[in-house]
Image (cartoon, rainbow, N blue to C red):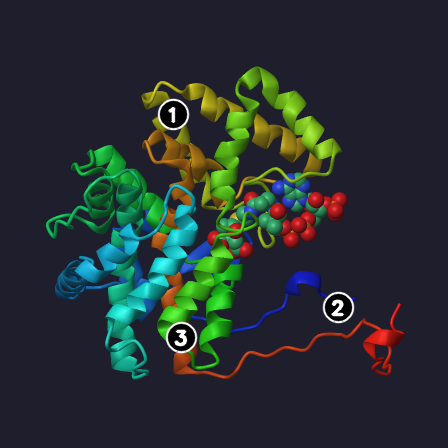
Amino acid sequence: MAEKKGLEGIVAAETKISSIIGTQLTYSGYEIDDLTENAQFEEVVYLIWNQKLPNKAELADFKAKLNSYMSLEDGMKAHLKSYDLTKVHPMAALRTSISMLAHFDEDADDMSEEKNKEKAIRIQAKVASLVAGIARVRNNKDIIEPNSDLSFAANFLYMLNGELPSDVEEEAINKALILHADHELNASTFTARVCVATLSDIYSGVVAAAGALKGPLHGGANEAVMKMLGEIGSLDNVDAYIHSKLENKEKIMGMGHRVYKEGDPRAKYLKEMSKLLTEQQGEPELHEMSSRIAEIVKNEKGLLPNVDFYSATVYHSLGIDHDLFTPIFTLSRVSGWLAHILEQYADNRLIRPRAEYVGPDVRKYTSIDERN
Ligand SMILES: CC(=O)SCCNC(=O)CCNC(=O)[C@H](O)C(C)(C)COP(=O)(O)OP(=O)(O)OC[C@H]1O[C@@H](n2cnc3c(N)ncnc32)[C@H](O)[C@@H]1OP(=O)(O)O
Ligand SMILES: O=C([O-])CC(=O)C(=O)O
């Protein structure tokens, strides 16, 4: 067997975008706590794309560009309306629609640095409209045009719900977007880098990454956490449910992490928000159930909550449909993918590891009549 199954611990790239040392997560040198408590998501996107925080003029220019790209073309809206969203998961719809964006971009295959940077802004902006648009179309509601007076977080909620968000809602989404923006060489980001290292285009890299994020061992875990809470039903049922899962060697979603063994530094903010928002919504039991799950899994397995665990109850308390949780993760993480794609292009080499062959020895072809 390959020595490092799942490439655990292998350093496969150099990056200036984010770093994990123990339980310290930094984006281009800034601690995640500092950014979560003080920054706007747009500043963080600028930071991870440029390795510097924007000054006032740079931020204004960046926001203006994001806003100018946010509307979907009529053809793109018609495309979204052609999906059967009663059958297709929004994450599958989002993956497909990101690919379709390239068909409306005459620069899609232009590989110049200038055009790629511009396309990054366009993709970041349009993914917000796509997530909101998919949610609206499936509920037979009109697609809402973005409002350029709003922050990225508020604009997303406005396009999703058709009404201005409260300050609490805007702050919660802004924080969640910052916390999910980048995470070193996680599976979806690695996928993006592998894809574009063939010198494929930026849209292909983002589509490949979205496919990787969708899985329940990665970004899909946030939706799975809410499904688990629904199955458990009440605080009284938590112990029996979790013990039975663990006895059957089943995984508890939202718990554990490949890199963080002493805890995910992002989880504490989401835990705080989960407590506050579930109380405000009159559903404190959901947070109490989550805390009890975390306590049992820590005691029994030594595993701690990851970013997906408490984000589930945060999004639920904001009234967001459970199958939109991973698309919202995408809305944030696309900033990290784009940062890594640009970094990969800037100093590219094809990513092509080797596999250890463990199949049958060399043998001769036999005609179909001779086979049993
Ligand atoms: C944004 C993100 O991607 S954060 C991660 C989101 N994913 C999840 O929350 C899914 C649940 N968690 C997991 O599946 C894992 O903890 C991962 C995939 C996140 C990381 O896992 P890895 O470090 O690769 O550990 P791996 O899957 O090899 O498991 C190692 C052992 O811990 C156990 N384990 C790991 N996570 C869990 C869990 N959540 N619940 C129960 N047991 C677990 C495994 O069953 C295995 O036990 P064994 O040695 O007795 O067979
Ligand atoms: O880093 C990882 O393996 C998974 C993760 O937490 C993330 O992508 O945010």
Dot 3 or dot 2, earlier in sequence:
2
Distance (Cα) linking label 1 and label 3: 39 Å
Picture residue at 75% right of the left edge, 67% below the top: 3
Q: Residue at x 14, y 65 (%)?
A: 61
Outermost residue to the top: 236
Relative to 192, 64 lies left or right: left
Residue 219 is labelled as none
- Mark 3–mark 2 CB contact (< 8 Å): no
Dividing the picture into quadrants, the one containing residue 303 is top right
Residue 75 placed where, x, y %? 21, 61
Q: Nearer the viewer, mark 3 or mark 2?
A: 2
Residue at the limit of the structure toward the left, as seen here: 149
Report helix, strand or loop for mark 1.
Answer: helix
Asked if residue 52 can be seen in this view, the reply is no
Q: In 3D space, how far apart are the residues under numbered discs 3 and 2 (Cα atoms)?
A: 29 Å
Q: Name the foreground residue: 136 vs 185.
A: 136
Query: For the residue carrying disc 1, how many other residues have a C-alpha within 10 Å: few (<14), some (14-19), or many (20+)?
Result: many
Amino acid carrying label 2: it is: Ala
How far across and how far down the image is residue 222, in percent?
48, 41
Q: What residue is shown with label 1?
A: 278
In percent of width and height, residue 29 lies at: 39, 62
Mark 2 lies on residue: 2
Query: Where residue 157 sits in the image (x, y, percent)?
Result: 24, 42
Looking at numbered disc 1 in the image, what kind of residue is underneath it?
Thr
Between residues 185 and 222, which one lies in front from this camera angle? 222
Q: Ligand 2 near label 3 (Cβ, under 8 Å)?
A: no
Q: Three-letter amino acid code at disc 3? A: Glu
Residue at position x 43%, y 44% from top? 87
Mark 3 lies on residue: 343
For the N terminus, the image quarter is: bottom right
Disc 2 + disc 1, Cβ < 8 Å: no
- The residue lying at 46 percent from left, 36 percent from top is 310
